[in-house]
Image (spheres, rainbow, N blue to C red):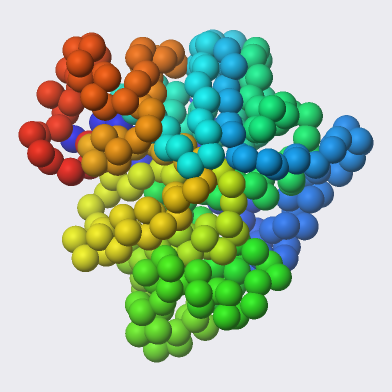
């Protein structure tokens, strides 16, 4: 059952809008910076990162007059993983979009290391975050450029190292043009799973404090899936990770599960806590996941 996702991910769309007209990574950052040239932004301080602790305090938001998320509170410390689960439309993507400051809360506040994200420069906020999304945002350019987008001044060696850590180096090297393979709108003949590995490599290179992950629901071949899981483990280590989770394994291993329904937090706790409570999550695990299954829901 795919009921937890929509085919097009809003967050990925946001990036695609940003990237669609773009020839290369330099231009992307120029555009991002231009949007920051409002006077207010200029007056703001950069985010001062100490730990990478993320906190939502009574956050409410609506795209229109109706509230999409209400009274969302949770916090995640460096090294912790928070998994967001809930049916489609529950508000998982909206929460992530608020953290990335694609939208601003109507009420409440979001902080990183105690600083309200609305009061720091957007570029300094986004520099501390990496996104690994289902619809990976790759732009037309070479694989090397696409990974280097994570850190524009990285050397080729840094890119190769990040690719190796992301389990991507060997498949890239097997392509006829290797790192010079051009990715176009068709994807350049690489699979969905391989695209994910590239986006993990990009995130590893960026080395952010905060990681946002939208777990894949489409089927990926088993070998690549194992590579992705391994690479993600490496990437998540020591960072604050917010995961829109679809796999029971991921959810089970999270430090905290936030169960959403219709924009509200229904319950929160670890897998064991929530099973013991015998509430919504426990019911969901019984009905949505087969016993012992790791399949996407
Ligand atoms: P999914 O698992 O399907 O991605 P979700 O839990 O991530 O769902 P959201 O994408 O956050 O849910 O959507 C929450 C609600 O907000 C839905 O009713 C959705 O239709 C609405 N919504 C999402 N993005 C927008 C937008 N850009 N403009 C207006 N409404 C939106």
What's the residue at 56%, 50% (across, down)?
A: 130
Query: Does residue 288 appear in the picture of this structure?
Result: yes
- The correct choice, above or below, for 31 with respect to 281 in the image is below
Of residues 256 and 291, the one drawn nearer to the viewer in this rendering:
256
The residue lying toward the viewer, choosing from 182 and 287, is 287
Question: In the rendered image, which quarter contains the C terminus?
Answer: top left
**Residue situated furthest left in the rendering:** 291
In the picture, measured across the screen, residue 245 lies left or right of residue 285, that is right
Report x, y in % for residue 74. 50, 21
Left/right of residue 229 with respect to residue 28 in the rendered view: left
Q: Is residue 240 above or below residue 203?
A: above
> Is residue 51 shown above or below 58?
below
Q: Position of residue 4 (x, y in %)?
A: 30, 31
Q: Please tell me whether residue 293 is drawn above or below residue 169 in the rendered image.
A: above
Name the spot of residue 214 as percent of width and height, x first. Answer: 41, 43
Task: Identify the residue shown where x is 18% and y is 35%.
Answer: 1
């Amino acid at each position: 059952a795919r009921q937890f996702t929509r085919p097009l991910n809003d967050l990925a769309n946001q990036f695609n809008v940003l990237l669609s007209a773009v020839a290369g990574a330099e231009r992307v950052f120029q555009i991002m910076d231009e949007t920051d040239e409002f006077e207010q932004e200029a007056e703001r301080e950069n985010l001062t990162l100490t730990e990478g602790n993320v906190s939502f305090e009574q956050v409410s938001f609506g795209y229109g007059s109706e509230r999409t998320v209400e009274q969302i509170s949770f916090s995640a410390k460096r090294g912790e993983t928070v998994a967001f689960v809930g049916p489609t439309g529950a508000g998982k993507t909206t929460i992530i979009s608020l953290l990335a400051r694609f939208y601003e809360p109507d009420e409440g506040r979001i902080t990183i290391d105690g600083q309200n994200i609305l009061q720091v420069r957007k570029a300094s906020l986004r520099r501390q975050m990496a996104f690994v999304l289902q619809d990976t945002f790759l732009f037309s350019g070479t694989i090397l450029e696409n990974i280097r987008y994570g850190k524009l001044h990285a050397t080729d060696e840094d890119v190769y190292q990040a690719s190796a850590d992301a389990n991507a180096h060997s498949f890239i090297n097997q392509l006829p043009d290797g790192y010079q393979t051009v990715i176009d709108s068709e994807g350049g003949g690489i699979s969905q799973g391989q695209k994910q590995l590239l986006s993990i490599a990009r995130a590893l290179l960026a080395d952010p404090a905060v990681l946002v992950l939208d777990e894949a629901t489409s089927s990926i071949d088993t070998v690549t899936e194992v590579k992705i899981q391994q690479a993600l483990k490496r990437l998540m280590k020591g960072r604050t990770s917010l995961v829109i989770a679809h796999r029971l394994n991921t959810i089970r291993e999270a430090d905290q599960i936030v169960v959403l329904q219709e924009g509200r937090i229904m319950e929160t706790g670890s897998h064991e806590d929530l099973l013991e409570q015998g509430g919504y999550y426990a019911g969901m695990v019984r009905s949505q996941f087969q016993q012992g299954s790791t399949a996407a829901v």
